[in-house]
């Protein structure tokens, strides 16, 4: 499962359109499953699937089942194999009760589940997901993530994911490619991303006795109340051990927690640097 991210205009959707054969590149080359997408678009389409969060493929005024049946003809699926496959996907994605409901009457979460099912009917080896959780509420997003993870684990299908929601990335992907202005500026694991670009740590401290103020050079106070304080430390300027030693000597401490800033802060920092 690969996250392919970047700011608006970085070239994410354009890249997907080239990798699926929709667009011709002005230069360079690419292969997907051994095929040059824009030269073998029809052949490739039988091996890949795609879901664009803002560009539905379901017929809006018809039930989802009608689109599924149409796709079975387009992909030249055997009737028995198609029915077996459809029954499996309907069960996994829990859409049995909405199969015959016009798409226009479905919630966004229900529609997105049906969109993913439509892209999986022909058992693709790679599925391109462009903002699959956009506009979904928290519960629907979590459900979609679990379904994508299950899909990857059970069917071994490669997931190529673009998303502005860093929770999608953290929950699903181990590898991340960051692009900006059409160029790759990072390609590696999320853990290595933290090591390479992370400068700040967040230190949360709970005190036994109330404190009125806290002062230490090189430390930024994020939040302070009677018994708790959240600090931000630039570890390139001051080691964590120095801060902890200072706190323990000066105050009675109940608990200390050291964490990294949210991944979106790290990614935002990379965008600004490039």
Image (spheres, grey):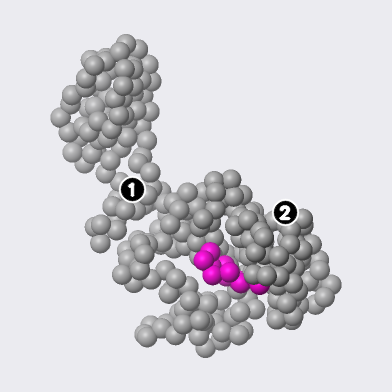
Question: At 38% from the left edge and 44% from the top edge, which residue is drawn?
Answer: 262
Circle on res. 265: 1
Span of residues in magenta: 49-59
Magenta stretch, overall SS: loop
Numbered mark located on residue 143 in the image: none
* Quarter of the figure with the C terminus: bottom left
Say whether residue 125 is left or right of residue 102.
left
In the rendered structure, which disc, 1 or 2, sits on the residue that comes first in sequence?
Answer: 2
Camera sees residue 161: no
Residue that mark 2 sits on: 94
Q: 250 left or right of 162? A: left
Q: Residue furthest left?
A: 217
Q: Residue at x 34, y 53 (%)?
A: 267
Alpha carbon separation for disc pair 1 and 2? 35 Å
* Residue 66 at x, y percent in the picture: 74, 72
Q: Position of residue 214 (x, y in %)?
A: 21, 22
Residues tagged 1 and 2 counted as in contact (Cβ below 8 A)? no
Camera-near label (1 vs 2) is: 2
- Callout 1 secondary element: helix
């Amino acid at each position: 499962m690969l996250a392919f991210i970047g700011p608006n205009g970085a070239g994410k959707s354009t890249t997907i359109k080239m990798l699926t054969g929709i667009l011709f590149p002005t230069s360079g080359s690419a292969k997907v499953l051994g095929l040059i997408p824009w030269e073998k678009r029809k052949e490739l389409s039988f091996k890949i699937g795609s879901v664009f969060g803002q560009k539905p493929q379901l017929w809006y005024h018809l039930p989802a089942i009608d689109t599924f049946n149409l796709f079975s003809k387009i992909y030249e699926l055997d009737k028995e194999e198609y029915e077996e496959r459809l029954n499996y996907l309907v069960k996994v994605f829990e859409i049995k009760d909405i199969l015959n409901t016009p798409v226009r009457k479905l919630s966004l979460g229900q529609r997105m589940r049906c969109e993913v099912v439509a892209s999986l009917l022909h058992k693709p080896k790679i599925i391109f997901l462009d903002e699959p959780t956009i506009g979904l509420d928290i519960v629907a997003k979590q459900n979609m993530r679990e379904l994508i993870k299950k899909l990857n684990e059970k069917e071994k299908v490669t997931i190529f994911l673009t998303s502005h929601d860093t929770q999608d990335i953290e929950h699903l992907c181990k590898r991340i490619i960051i692009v900006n202005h059409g160029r790759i500026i990072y390609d590696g694991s999320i853990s290595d991303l933290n090591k390479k670009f992370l400068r700040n740590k967040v230190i949360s401290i709970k005190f036994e006795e109330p404190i009125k103020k806290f002062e230490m050079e090189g430390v930024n106070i994020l939040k302070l109340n009677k018994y708790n304080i959240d600090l931000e430390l630039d570890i390139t300027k001051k080691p964590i051990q120095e801060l902890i030693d200072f706190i323990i000597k000066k105050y009675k401490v109940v608990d200390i927690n050291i964490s990294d800033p949210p991944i979106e802060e790290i990614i935002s920092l990379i965008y600004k640097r490039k």
